[in-house]
Image (cartoon, grey):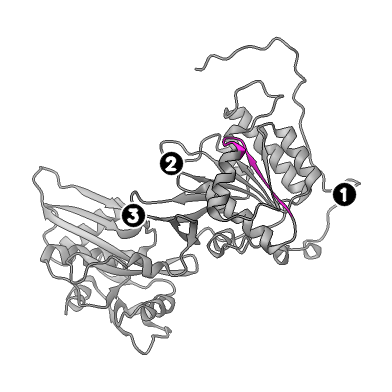
Amino acid sequence: MVEEKVETEAKPKHKARTFRLPEADDAPSPVPIADLDGGDDRRASTGIDELDRVLGGGLVPGMLVLVGGDPGIGKSTLLLQALDGITKQSAGRVLYVSGEESPQQVKLRAERLGVDGQRLLLLAETRTDRIVSAVERLEPAAVVVDSIQSIYDPEIESAPGSVSQIREVAARLMYMAKARAVPTLLVGHVTKEGGLAGPKVLEHLVDTVLYFESATGHPYRILRAHKNRFGSTNEIGVFEMEARGLMPVANPSELFLAERPEDAPGSVVLPAIEGTRPVLVEVQALVSPTTFGTPRRTCLGFDSARAALLVAVLERRAGLQLLGCDVFVNVAGGMTLREPAADLAVAVALASSLTNKPLPPRTLVFGEVGLAGELRGVTQPDVRLAEASKLGFRRAVVPTAALKKTDVPADVEAVGVGALDEALEISFS
């Protein structure tokens, strides 16, 4: 409950708003879907390959994007760099609406990033009607609103950032983006739980929802799409925070394995698939006798319930005594693994830590583990092995089913296994 001042002056009643495309003068009529323009050839590049990858290839005219992330993670920096990239790709102007920072603060950031400010227009405004009027007058190639929680509609009798304000402001900005065919990017605050602040309808209104993620203490950031009407939600973009801004990482695999220790028990390399991109990540495990009555199962970047399942399978099918030990699983670099291909890597890492035996150098594993101890095939094994070959890995332990109709690189020895106990025996040989 928040105390607010009651205004006595009469305000105009809220009226439903509709938008109409500029060329649609009459009532719309149904048309065959085959006659519609798909619009893929009209995508505008932001000049940042990692951002274009997550967006599905670039910005679509009229696209409404919501970007969320923890405070200070680099949302404003990334969008300012994206606007600069758009001005370099096209001859049009772009508009940056700042509702929280002063123009001087934005200018200092732009100078630090080396942004060309001739065609990047800055508007320090928090009223929705004035923002829409500026967009209609300037006709920019793209618009960034930072942030949606600071913008308000004077016709709504509530404080900026409230549920009714955010819903109404987002709806008006959506109408503006669709009617003017202007790509619009909104910055959203996040709650303590990590979700986007405001009503859930905000995520339903926008076309794309992007989350900026970062592990504490790491200089790199991961941009992930949680919703995308114009592309896949499985793609990720990897950036590294430097003094001159967010720099795209062309080879994330090399970055994630840069600090991997050699001959360390409990360390296993996994070729994961994020969208269409193969990424080699390090899976770490630590097994130690418990000092409490109930053993702990702590996981970072991996599902805890899945880890408990793998511990039970190792205990029953492979004969390893793990139920009386504390188990810790970590995915180095702040990555989050959601695919079943990580099962075998986690299981081998647990066995390696328990027996204190490291894997042979330049060896990686991947595969899905079933409750019966069987290994199941996974998707795109040829792409995973090709990425492993680029980084110098020469041996791979994979499910036998994954080797069917798979082009294995000539310099990689792919060993097919059918059961978990067999995989453990071959992995350490």
Please identify, in this view, whether the residue under mark 2 or under mark 1 is nearer the observer.
2
Q: Residues within 10 Å of mark 1 (few under 14, many from 20)?
A: few
**Residue that numbered label 2 is attached to:** 194
In the image, which disc is placed on residue 259?
none
Give above or below for 60 relative to 267. above
> Which element type, helix, strand or loop, lies under badge 2?
loop
Image point (51%, 45%), residue name: 68
Is residue 192 at all visible to an observer of this figure?
yes
Q: Nearer the viewer, residue 423 or 144?
A: 144
Q: Secondary structure at mark 1?
A: loop
Which of the 4 image quadrants contains residue 284?
bottom left
Q: CA distance from mark 1 to mark 3?
A: 49 Å
Say what amino acid the circle numbered 1 marks: Ala
398 drawn magenta: no
Q: Identify which residue, 9 or 408, lies in the foreground.
A: 9
Depth check: give the residue in front, 130 or 321.
130
**Other-residue count near label 3 (Cα within 10 Å), few / some / many at <14 / 14–19 / ≥20:** some
Q: Which residues are magenta?
A: 93-103
CB under 8 Å between callouts 2 and 1?
Answer: no
The amino acid marked with disc number 3 is Gly
The disc at residue 301 is 3
